[in-house]
Amino acid sequence: MTRTVYVNGDYLPETEAKVSIFDRGFLMADGVYEVTSVLGGKLIDFDGHARRLERSLNELDMPHPPELGEMLEIHRKLVTENGIEDGLVYLQITRGSDGDRDFAYPARDTRPTVVLFTQSKPGLADSPAAKTGMRVITIDDVRWGRRDIKTVQLLYPSMGKMMAKAAGADDAWMVQDGFVTEGTSNNAYIVKGNKIITRALSNDILHGITRAAVLRFAREAQMEVEERNFTVEEAKDADEAFVTSASAFVMPVVQIDDAVLGDGVPGRVAPRLREIYLDESLKAAI
């Protein structure tokens, strides 16, 4: 089935969608993106993604496209047009193209490029990995210093995913100065005793929308949360670990490098947080 996609104000069959070869997203990775999950035909955490999108644009001094105020309508139309029950809506905005390649930004009135498409993921909330847990490896974090901006500079995270795959694992946790920063496409957490520990917000990690919701729900459920750096060795000695993201929600981690956590199966905290997050997010979905 050919999907309907959105490109610069037009809804088109994916086979007819085109972007200039001079687009700065293609030439310079000069763009930002968001991914919003869809469950039961409704958008999860849309307002949070919309706010982070505006922040990313502002941090890069990127002009706001005319469509910004219509993003909810565009998302809903694509979900309906493509019959998405469970899945994702991907949105990307680049600085556009002025018809050539240059390191300098194009003129301020250059129109940003806006692209959206959907991905159907039946059973998105019922991933088998939520029951068995993930295995991760640790790798050096050599990304640029503004990881808080959700840019399309995803080469190293992609390399990290492939390093994990080659090692027979599911993902990689990146490490800077001995401390875990985050996963390749998710925020990272450990549990010690009854305490949930995760790195505090800074330029070093993405300000995850799912992270914010999960920590809020954890505190409302009277769980103790500590936002601080934690080492790889501390993670390997933890009772539990997990990651959060817009598409994985809350996903248990049962092995870090060669260290098996607990009994090698998801513990008590991560599955409970996943249950709470999905229940509360579905109630608020739009």
Image: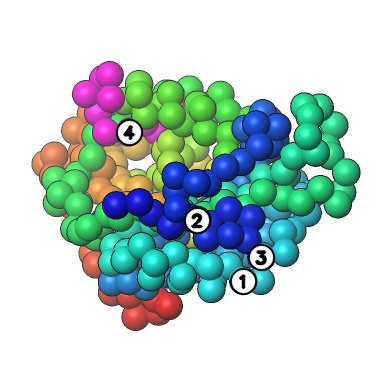
Mark 4–mark 1 distance (CA, rounded to whole Å): 35 Å
Q: Name the residue under label 1.
A: 70
Q: Residues within 10 Å of mark 3 (few under 14, many from 20)?
A: few
Q: Which region of the structure is painted magenta?
A: 165-175
The answer to whether residue 110 is magenta is: no
Residue positioned 28% across, 25% down in the render: 165
Instruction: Compare residues 206 and 283 and report the one nearer the observer.
Output: 283
- CB under 8 Å between discs 3 and 1: yes
Mark 2–mark 4 distance (CA, rounded to whole Å): 34 Å
* Viewer-nearest of discs 2 and 4: 2
Does residue 24 appear to the left or right of 120 in the view shown? right
Mark 1–mark 2 distance (CA, rounded to whole Å): 17 Å
The quarter holding residue 161 reads top left
Q: Mark 3 points at which residue?
A: 68
Residue 257 pos. (x, y %): 28, 25
Does residue 189 appear to the left or right of 146 in the view shown? left
Q: Which mark is residue 171?
A: 4
Residue 7 pos. (x, y %): 58, 53
Residue 192 pos. (x, y %): 31, 49
The answer to whether residue 173 is magenta is: yes
Residue positioned 50% across, 26% down in the render: 156
Looking at the image, which residue sits at the far bottom?
Answer: 283
Instruction: Compare residues 102 and 263 and report the one nearer the observer.
Output: 102
Residue positioned 57% across, 42% down in the render: 18
N-term mark: 4 or 1: 1
Q: Name the residue under label 2.
A: 12
Instruction: Compare residues 98 and 196 and report the one nearer the observer.
Output: 98
Mark 3–mark 4 distance (CA, rounded to whole Å): 33 Å
